[in-house]
Image (cartoon, rainbow, N blue to C red):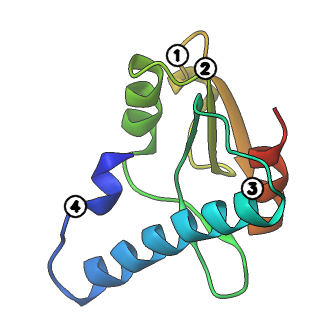
Amino acid sequence: MASAFRRKSGPTEAGSYWRWAIALIVAAVASSVRNRPIAASTAVFGEVGLAGEVRGISQSALRVREAGQMGFTRCIVPHGNCAREDVPSGLQLIEVKTVSEAIDQLMEW
């Protein structure tokens, strides 16, 4: 989502910015290696840790609602980061714990 690219200040926020960028790079590389595009109807958010874990982010409920309003039909998010009641109708919420799980879900459509 566009907010992932917003410039932030401070050491903690800058680190978060780069973890978001790494998450996008992981998705792009997986798509290229598997020679399969990521569905345009899929939104993805979260932070990637050094051990390959997918970490939660702030305001996840808001981001999921916005993804639904923007027409996305699938949303891949960190496990436990968003309550089911926050998911708009018509949007499939897919929770993942690791980068490997996220890649498998990204390629499955």
Q: Between label 4 and label 2, give the one nearer the viewer.
A: 4
Rounded to the nearest angstrom, the CA distance separating label 4 from label 2 is 25 Å
Which disc, if any, is residue 102?
Answer: 3
Q: Is residue 73 above or below residue 14?
A: above
Residue 5: which quarter of the image? bottom left
**Residue flagged by tag 3: what amino acid is it?**
Ala
User: Mark 1 sits on what residue?
Assistant: 88
- Marks 1 and 2 in Cβ contact (< 8 Å): yes
Q: Is residue 102 above or below residue 68?
A: below
**Residue flagged by tag 2: what amino acid is it?**
Leu
- The secondary element bearing badge 1 is classed as loop
Residue 17: which quarter of the image? bottom left
Q: Where does the image place residue 108, in percent across and percent down from the top left? A: 84, 39
User: Mark 4 sits on what residue?
Assistant: 6
> Which residue is depicted at the point 29% across and 51% down?
3
Q: Where does the image place residue 43, in percent across and percent down from the top left? A: 55, 39
Rounded to the nearest angstrom, the CA distance separating label 3 from label 1 is 21 Å
Residue 64 visible, this angle: yes
Q: Where does the image place residue 106, in percent across and percent down from the top left? A: 74, 47
> Which residue is depicted at the point 58% across and 10% down?
89
> Which residue is depicted at the point 57% across and 49% down?
81
**Residue flagged by tag 1: what amino acid is it?**
Pro
Rounded to the nearest angstrom, the CA distance separating label 1 from label 2 is 6 Å
Mark 2 closeness class: few <14, some 14–19, many ≥20 residues within 10 Å = some
> Which residue is depicted at the point 53% across and 25% down?
72
Q: Earlier in the sequence, mark 2 or mark 3?
A: 2
